[in-house]
Amino acid sequence: MVEVENLSVRYRGRYALEAISFKLEPSQIVGIIGPNGAGKSTMVKAMLGLIPIASGTVKFCDKPLRLNLSKVAYVPQRANIDWDYPTTVWNVVMMARTVKTGLFRKPSRMSEELAKAALERVGILDLRDRQIGELSGGQQQRVFLARSLAKQADLFIFDEPFTGIDRRTEDIIFEVFEELKVQGKTLLVINHDLGETLNYYDQLLLLNKQLIAFGCRQEVLTATNIQQTYGISLRLVVA
């Protein structure tokens, strides 16, 4: 479904990413891990066409991914969102339906039902009229999870969705991930946690400006790979 080939990004003459290649299949949850500055966010932004690439191709369903974004749901880091923007939970979730509806047209009944169902699924329908800046970190993350669900995408990309949230929200996110996987969706998730949560992923992509390893947990989380990526020895929990 997703094919990345020789993807490279350069900043001021230096490689932020160099010759990254991998393929993602449907019905998989893939975790991206690596140290700070490894290029994890850079990679997903380059895949989406949000930043220029130096070389390489990114295809989704045999088309350039940047030309097929109607089938992609992207949730950026919470730190990159303007939470002071005066809008409600409902309006944020309805943004997912803009492409289907059009900028200046009234949302369809179907779009409204999808937004309502998404908010119900993540447990915050009762907050639909609240300003997003009034919410807790976990509630804010659930808003954007609901927005991604309302889009009815095939490829879901999450940039550190577990940062600054409560345990209940974390549980909801992983539950939704599993449901999407069963539906045949593909999920690419940047994760900073190197503990037990890694066991939720079908594949791991270990990155440090270059692709160190890609595969199942046992193949990726070897002492050699961890040493090469982080420069230290780590004991990870691998089921």
Image (tube, rainbow, N blue to C red):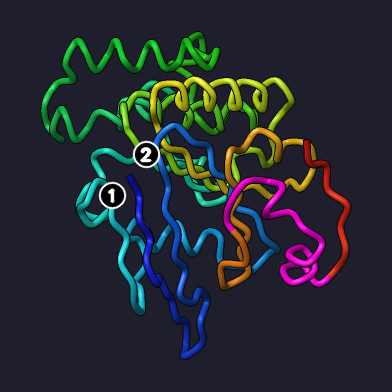
Asked if residue 227 is among those painted magenta in the image, a careful observer would answer yes
Q: Is residue 221 magenta?
A: yes
Residue 8 percent location from the top left of the image: 42, 75
The answer for how far apart the CA atoms under marks 1 and 2 are is 9 Å
Viewer-side residue, 55 vs 101: 55
The overriding secondary structure of the stretch rendered in magenta is helix
Q: Residue at x 45, y 21 (%)?
A: 182
Residue found 35% across the figure and 61% down from its top: 50
Secondary structure state at the residue bearing disc 1? strand
Q: Quadrant of residue 137?
A: top right
- Residue span colored magenta: 214-231
Q: Is residue 111 visible?
A: yes
Give residue 60's mark.
1
Identified at 70% across, 36% down, the residue is: 199
> Residue 82, can we see it?
no
Kindly state the secondary structure of the residue where label 2 is placed: strand
